[in-house]
Image: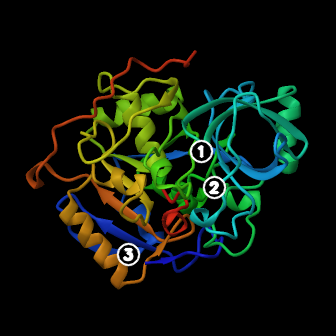
Amino acid sequence: MIPAAVAVQRPPDARLMVVDASGQVVHKRRADFPALVRSRDLVIANDAATLPASLSGTHLATGSPIELRLAGRRSLLPQHIDTFKAVAFGAGDFRTPTESRPLPPPFSVGDSLQLGPLRAVVRTILEHPRLIEVRFEGSAQKIWEGLARHGRPIQYSYLSDPLALWDTWTTIASRPVAFEPPSAGFLLDWRLVDSLRARGATFATLTHAAGISSTGDARLDAMLPLAEAYEIPARTADAIDAVRQRNGRIIAVGTTVVRALEDAAAYDGCVRAGRAVATLTIGPFTQLRIVDALVTGQHEPGTSHYELLRAFHDDSVLRRTLAEAEMRAYRTHEFGDSLFIVRRSPSAGTITATSDIRRGPLSEPASDSDRTAGRSG
């Protein structure tokens, strides 16, 4: 596979690899996606818009240049814009592969950071020296204005030209809460949504704060995905109940949708409307309770996105998809080609173990990295 190096959301030559419930692989155009949707199905997409989450600035205690990539917040509420988890880099920008970037200076609690017009203070050093929690000074309006004026979209070195913020927004984008684009949704436009509805299918959305996909540090990358806030509207929860009653399929557009829905259902198998923070990590030992099929990007082993695919099919099937993608030069990353994968049928074998993470109903909560980076699902 080769990186998709041009920021075009719906290239006319985009391809779609299809993996059915038995593990058979066929190749189609990405424009053929609506024909794979049945009349009783429900298609759910992430409508999060992308924040300008890359902030260059200075570590004031040492005068060292840094880049801060915002990576998480405690909820999607607009007033909760002052405190973020963030990954820190030393000098440089996206043109240098993340694994080749110099380290930032050592952080201490209370350090001040000047990030363009914004001042932030390090509140906590988290599970890794480069993973910190910062609090911005000033009002919510001042912080929003500072992000808009100074921030840039997070991007990686396989994209040669700087991204504009609108390059990262899907057609259905609403609230700016994602840190990297939920780019499986790049295949959507309103004409495609109309064609799904014309087939008798239902289309719905949720909002999930898609996190960062790579850091350039193997130990830090192993911690991904970090906790990610999400919100499921009542109409989407109702649509899920309705499609299950009529034995239709639930098709997720993007790995973030899978994570939100399965996290919401982890307690008792039901998806309720509300806000929460996804802590569920999905992999080969996860029993999917809600999602029957997934539209995503082309993912490579070693990434959290690929681990999520292992909940849909076993490794022999996924190895075959990789071989097919390599042979046919599929394009990776957020502007690359797509994959439509249907969860394995019971006759193909199931995994019955579940994640050890349990939580209650939804409620408001009180290397090689650039080769695999770029959220494409």
Instruction: Name the residue that disc number 1 marks.
Output: 47
Q: Is residue 349 shown left or right of residue 276?
A: left
**Which residue appears at 67% of the width and 69% of the height?**
96
Mark 1 vs 2: CB contact within 8 A? yes
Q: Which amino acid does label 3 sit on?
A: Lys
Q: Which amino acid does label 1 sit on?
A: Asp
Q: Is residue 175 shown left or right of residue 42?
A: right
Give the camera-side residue of 135 and 174: 135
Instruction: Name the residue that disc number 2 marks.
Output: 170
Instruction: Name the residue that disc number 3 marks.
Output: 28
Mark 3 vs 2: CB contact within 8 A? no
Q: In this view, does 13 lie above or below 254?
A: below
Marks 3 and 1, how far apart in space?
A: 25 Å
Marks 1 and 2, how far apart in space?
A: 8 Å
Q: Is residue 82 shown left or right of residue 371?
A: right
The mark nearer the N terminus, 1 or 2, is 1
Q: Is residue 194 visible?
A: no
